Amino acid sequence: MSDILDFIKAKDPGQKEFHQAVQEVLETVQPVLDRNPEYRQSAVLQRITEPERVIMFRVPWMDDQGQVNVNRGFRIEMSCAIGPYKGGLRFHPSVNLSILKFLAFEQAFKNALTTLSMGGGKGGSDFDPKGKSDNEVMRFCQSFMTELYRHIGPDTDIPAGDIGVGAREIGYLFGMYKRLRNEFTGVLTGKSLGWGGSLIRPEATGYGSVYFASEMLATRDDNLEGKTCLVSGSGNVAQYTVEKIIELGGKATTLSDSSGYIYDEEGIDKDKLAFVKRLKNVRRGRIREYVDKYSETVYTEVDSTLDYNPLWNHKADCAFPSATQNEINEKDARNLVKNGVYLVSEGANMPSTPEAINIFLDNKLLYAPGKAANAGGVAVSGLEMAQNSMRLSWPREEVDSRLRTIMKSIHQSCLDAAADYGVPGNYMAGANIAGFVKVVNAMLDQGLV
Ligand code: NDP
Ligand code: 2IT
């Protein structure tokens, strides 16, 4: 196991996020390999850690001043063992091969857990949509799709949103794909409702993460009623996490963006959440404006000299990290435990460092890893694909009830796999093992391809 990890690190030395994601999975699936010696002969670890295909391309685009800019575009086609490549696109200046490979790697196992037939992929660009006009974003998306279109298709690879890619970007990307291919198909998910989108897709990741939390609480005869929750981020996932927490009787006290966070001791209610949605989705403003509107609340600017994030240092019961990778470090994890938090449900992908995860596990928290807790988003993407194929759309209640059933099933698969391999209650090990076994068995069934 450690030989394989050393080999991967030596081959791509700079890819620290990818190494982190791989190390976690390799460490937890060791007992699966011990029980299935044929996996070694078939070199399954070497195969699942090497993307089936990596596409990297130049994206030239013109800004509103007539200046030409160049960004880098990517699509990582990680695994199509159980279905066509599926996963989001991230537009953020930090995007690089390491981050997209970690996301694509996690996606393959996440998608396997959803019960639907989807392989794993991820893509994006180091383009920063922040501060750009709609026209600039449109020109960028059109240029990006002018290359991407030849690699994707409704039965081949189906991208969707992630950080920096929401309904606006999906619209521009879809428009260009349709023009280039002369076909109207479900090649992207997260589409708007009027032209092929699914009800509940915008809500799905946040709702799903809270449904998963409710399932974990139910194992202790508990629920979200009256629970205080810390939420990070203020984008798609964070907004619908707060919405579901409110609906289930909990109280969310924090939201953040990359500049800082707000603390609202009274709780973010429906009206305040509606303000955040307008602020973030329509005006594309900063979370600090929340305190201008609600003066009894507190805004704290990011302080890069601190070695912890003060957002995670408030009294609470539950935490829903919903911004980005490695946003909870060891010190943050200790602060969470010290403040009484006993449940962490990861809306973001890999938001906790390995040291933070160890603290959650040592302290017997109900800890749900992203590949289980945030799988509701891609699951409803799968339901969007199903509806597109049938050329019909299901009502809100139907999609929501399917989402709830899928989250329940993921929760059960994690518990079953964890118990089967002697680590009862360890959702991280359970998610990794259940996802891994499904992907690897499909690979073995299909021969050496
Ligand atoms: P959005 O772009 O809608 O929102 C992202 C939020 O996170 C913003 O508040 C953003 O702040 C903050 N953020 C992003 N990068 C950083 C950073 N480096 N440091 C601090 N804050 C940051 O994205 P989503 O809500 O869609 O995604 C959030 C997380 O959820 C990601 O980890 C994503 O991979 C994961 N996820 C998303 C799914 C989906 O369906 N959308 C599905 C499953 C997981 P700012 O505006 O200042 O950048
Ligand atoms: O990380 C994720 O699962 C997503 N960004 C959603 C992917 C999708 O295809 O809906």
Image (tube, grey):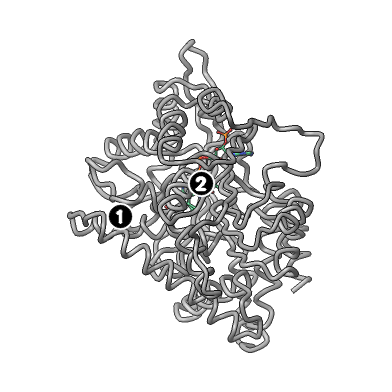
Q: Nearer the viewer, residue 223 or 149?
A: 223
- Check disc 2 and report the residue beneath it: 123
Q: Is residue 94 left or right of residue 290?
A: right
Cα distance in 3D space between marks 2 and 1: 19 Å
Please say whether residue 192 is visible from this viewpoint: yes
Query: Residue 31, image x and y in percent?
Result: 67, 83
Query: Residue 197, image x and y in percent?
Result: 28, 47
Q: Nearer the viewer, residue 236 or 218?
A: 218
The local secondary structure at tag 2 comes to: strand
Q: Is residue 122 above or below residue 142?
A: below
Q: Is residue 160 left or right of residue 307?
A: left
At label 2, which amino acid type do we have? Gly
**Label placed on residue 384:** 1
Q: Earlier in the sequence, mark 2 or mark 1?
A: 2
Please say whether residue 19 is visible from this viewpoint: no
Q: Is residue 16 left or right of residue 83?
A: right
Q: Is residue 252 above or below residue 350?
A: above
Q: Is residue 420 above or below residue 386?
A: below
The local secondary structure at tag 1 comes to: helix
At label 1, which amino acid type do we have? Glu
Query: Residue 70, image x and y in percent?
Result: 55, 26
Q: How many marks?
A: 2
Question: Mark 2–mark 1 contact, CB under 8 Å?
Answer: no
